[in-house]
């Protein structure tokens, strides 16, 4: 295989256009839908009549579009919770506004709390890591922590996902210390956050065109590549039938399962950067 992602086929997406045509959601399964905001996805999980949860909260300034999409799908029902895969600006950018608007608790892994309680900035991005214009622009991306005190709660230690029966959360560090993914065993649906990417997140062209490829986490914001490799291996062992990620279009089928397995097996070759500040020799197990 010349590059990770060869042969992946996109899930058939069913666009739903909101009344003002600015909120566009797509179906992944009967109970999982997504919304793309700029270059990142957020996810609505739950039956159309509710109860439901929001996974991730998009970039700053996304609150109104997310609210419109939620109303299109769920009417006036507020989410029971907002779940964060991690706290980077493109995944938590509108979370405080949405949590206040809906009165919803926000759940995240405890290891992510320093970045979600106003205490600690994320590390500087590595612009030389991964190549592409998105990587070069990454030093301009916000790193400041969010302060979600009053809304923030830890994900249960049991790995059960609050509100969502049949789902569990999986600790997938590497991209950030407290990064998590969400998985439903019944139909093997995986919401992977930034543990993997379904387009080349470092490339502006790939992000704009949504070229479907399977890659590791966005390289410029990933400081721990050994942990990232272990996390991809953990997700591969689930053999997901449907994969949705923070960046890129969802994918499904045997080819997606097999590509993820190959990415895990050849992670150091296919995903680990060969240059940049975060590059370290791979640690064997």
Image: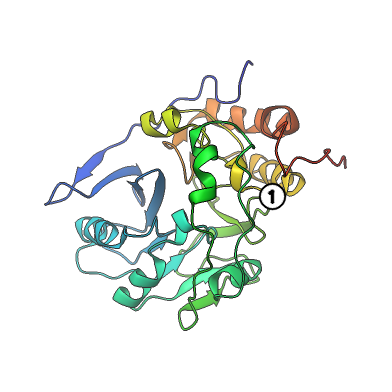
The vertical placement of 111 against 256, above or below, is below
Give the left or right position of residue 29, taking residue 146 as reference. Answer: left
Q: Quadrant of residue 170?
A: bottom right
What element does badge 1 sit on?
A: loop
Left or right: residue 142 versus residue 232 is: left
User: In this rendering, is residue 210 above or below 52?
Assistant: above
| Front in this rendered view, residue 248 or 186 | 248
x then y, percent, for residue 121: 60, 65
Residue drawn at (32%, 35%) of the image: 13
Q: Which of 81/96 is in front?
A: 96
Closer to us: 243 or 123: 123
Crowding around mark 1 (Cα neighbors within 10 Å: few <14, some 14 to 19, many 20+) is many
In the rendered image, residue 262, in percent from the top left (x then y), is placed at 67, 28
Residue toward you, 14 or 217: 217
Viewer can see residue 193: no
User: Residue 195: horizontal and vertical position, in percent?
Assistant: 60, 46
Task: Please give left or right for residue 100 compared with residue 108 in the image.
Answer: left
Give the colouring mode of the picture. rainbow
Q: Which residue is mark 1?
A: 223
């Amino acid at each position: 295989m010349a590059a990770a992602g060869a042969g992946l086929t996109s899930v058939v997406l069913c666009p739903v256009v909101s009344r003002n045509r600015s909120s566009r959601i797509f179906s992944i399964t009967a109970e999982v839908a997504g919304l793309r905001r700029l270059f990142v996805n957020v996810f609505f999980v739950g039956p159309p009549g509710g109860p439901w949860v929001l996974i991730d909260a998009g970039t700053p300034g996304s609150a109104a579009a997310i609210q419109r999409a939620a109303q299109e799908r769920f009417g006036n029902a507020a989410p029971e919770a907002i779940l964060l895969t991690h706290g980077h600006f493109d995944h938590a950018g509108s979370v405080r506004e949405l949590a206040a608007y809906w009165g919803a608790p926000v759940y995240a892994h405890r290891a992510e709390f320093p970045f979600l309680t106003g205490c600690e900035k994320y590390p500087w991005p590595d612009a030389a890591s991964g190549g592409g214009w998105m990587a070069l622009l990454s030093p301009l991306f916000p790193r400041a922590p969010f302060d979600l005190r009053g809304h923030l709660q830890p994900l249960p230690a049991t790995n059960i996902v609050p509100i969502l029966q049949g789902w569990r959360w999986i600790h997938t560090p590497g991209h950030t210390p407290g990064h998590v993914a969400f998985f439903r065993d019944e139909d093997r649906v995986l919401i992977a956050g930034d543990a993997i990417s379904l387009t080349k997140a470092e490339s502006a062209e790939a992000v704009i065109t949504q070229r479907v490829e399977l890659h590791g986490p966005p390289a410029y914001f990933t400081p721990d590549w050994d942990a990232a490799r272990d996390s991809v291996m953990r997700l591969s062992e689930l053999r997901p039938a449907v994969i949705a990620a923070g960046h890129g279009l969802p994918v499904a089928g045997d080819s997606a399962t097999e590509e993820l397995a190959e990415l895990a097996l050849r992670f150091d070759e296919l995903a680990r950067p060969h240059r940049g500040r975060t590059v370290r020799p791979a640690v064997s197990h």
